[in-house]
Amino acid sequence: MNIGELDKRVTLRSFTTTTNAENFPDRTYNDVATVWARLVPLRGMEAQENEKKTVTRKRVFEIRYRTDVDEKMVLVYNNKEHQVIYVEEIGRKDRLRIETELKL
């Protein structure tokens, strides 16, 4: 991988679910790491549901290989949380390809 292509700063976040005082689930996000990434825009999709228009943007980020990234995380880029959909190892522990989805 060409290190110069890693020009976007992203933060990987995991979450834990606890129960609050009213007995409702409460999510707490924890930053796992802030790393350099390469952004590969994929496509945008529009959907109509109950007269409400939903726009979704799929993106792929590539980062250096890590062992602590999974599909339960969110990836923060430009102060927007992208839900991690799929994580794939590229090469022999060379890098990770992270497919995400952002709902607008």
Image (cartoon, helix red, strand yellow):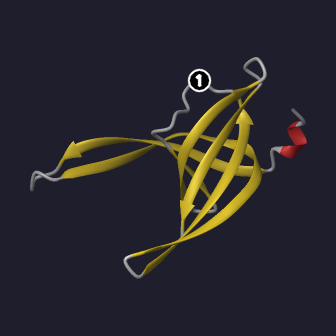
With 42 as the anchor, is 48 left or right in this view? left
47 vs 36: above or below: below
82 vs 2: above or below: below
18 vs 90: above or below: below
Residue in view at x 52 percent, y 33 percent: 70
Residue in view at x 54 percent, y 44 percent: 85
Q: Position of residue 43 (x, y in %)?
A: 70, 61
Residue that label 1 marks? 67
Q: Residues within 10 Å of mark 1 (few under 14, many from 20)?
A: few
**SS category of the residue bearing label 1:** loop
Rendering quarter of residue 82: bottom right
Q: Position of residue 33 (x, y in %)?
A: 58, 38
The answer to which of 44 and 95 lies nearer the viewer is 44
Rendering quarter of residue 87: top right
Of all residues, the one furthest to the top in this rendering is 92
Residue in view at x 64 percent, y 62 percent: 78
Q: Position of residue 67 (x, y in %)?
A: 59, 23
